[in-house]
Image (spheres, rainbow, N blue to C red):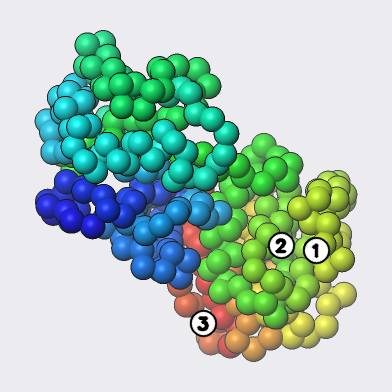
Amino acid sequence: MDRNAGKDGFGDLVMDKSVFRVSFPAGFRPLVERLIARDYGKASVLGGDESALMVEIPGLFKFSAYFQGASLVLDSVATAGLEEAFRLFSGRLNQTEPKRALTRVARDKLFARGGRLETFALRGFIRNEPSFPGAAARETLETAVSRLTGLRPESERPDVELSVALRDDGRAYFTAAARFPAPKIGRDAGSLPAATARLLCELSMAAPEDVFLDPFAGSGSIPLERALMAPYKMIFTGDIDNGKVAELKEKLKDPLFKKKARSIFPKVLDARDLSRFEDALFDTIVSDPPWGDWEGLTDDALVSLYAGFLKESHRVLKPGGCLVLLAGRTDALERARDQAFPATGAWLVREEFLVLVSGKKARALRWERA
């Protein structure tokens, strides 16, 4: 890829390779960069922030479950305003690389979705907020896109979503959104987002021989994501709520899990009493325990819950086993650890991320059982 680099490190994008802007749950950037290096071979991260990265990827792009979205970067310019950006991109569509990139999208060769493309929508954004550049500027770029691709503008249910986004770095980006069908496994309203659940499972350094546990399964986002990942030996999961466990069993009847259901064991569980499980049974525990707010738990009640859970987790994990938690109130978690293990050294803190989950601050933690 030939690029005239600017302050942000990637400047004007001239694409002999495809450049994508991928978004992910805020705060997980270091982990996402590791996963991109693992999954995309010769991919190069060109820049980004705490919830999105610009990534240069050779060949076809395969959507990863830890992304919340992905869009192909068609072009990039330095500009002072959104209206100017629309006009600049209109003129630049005759240049070789932007023209080639948009033509690939129009022919549906890049995203490999299948089906015929006929329509597109063109939208403007300033700092991620929808913004209108003015009718004349939008019409100029729409006309240029239609002339090049043969697609017609359509604001409702378009086949292709095109965006011009002006960002804080003083650059505007012309992108085409990639649509990838997500597995439909009956996620409940308010459940942990799929990308967050996948990143927590990835943080556990998932391995094919894993015996896995999530004792606070709730609607099942974490164990279901683990089941969709790399091979595992067994998945045990459950919740203290009988209704939640029954719902999880129904979700496992989905064809996605037809070949996996025999190695997934949903149970009614109290995370403070895992006596049904023998010592050192599990390689990995990944869970999103209650944060206390929804349940109306006092600080002391939350500390008591976490302390009981940590004691049992330490017992049922193998030495060196991994505990990954999403915690909204880490002060309560730390108090619980100190209460359950007055002597230090029971848990080794390996990684910690400050993240956002549905707009709320939280921490994603990876501890190792000493």
Say if 207 sits above or below 226 in the image.
below
Residue 31 drawn at (x, y percent): 43, 65
Residue 304 drawn at (x, y percent): 68, 64
Say if 367 sits above or below 151 in the image.
below
What is the spatial separation of the Cα atoms under label 2 and label 1, in whole angstroms?
Answer: 7 Å
Q: Quadrant of the N terminus?
A: bottom left
Q: In terms of depth relative to the viewer, which is nearer, 306 or 82?
A: 82
Q: Is residue 80 visible?
A: yes
Q: What residue lies at 59% left-to-right and 47% top-to-bottom?
A: 193
Kind of residue at disc 1: Lys
Residue 351 drawn at (x, y percent): 45, 72
Kind of residue at disc 2: Ala
* Residue holding disc 1: 260
Q: Secondary structure at mark 3?
A: strand
* Residue holding disc 3: 348
Say whether residue 199 is left or right of residue 26.
Answer: right
* Residue holding disc 2: 227
Number of marks in picture:
3
Q: Earlier in the sequence, mark 3 or mark 2?
A: 2
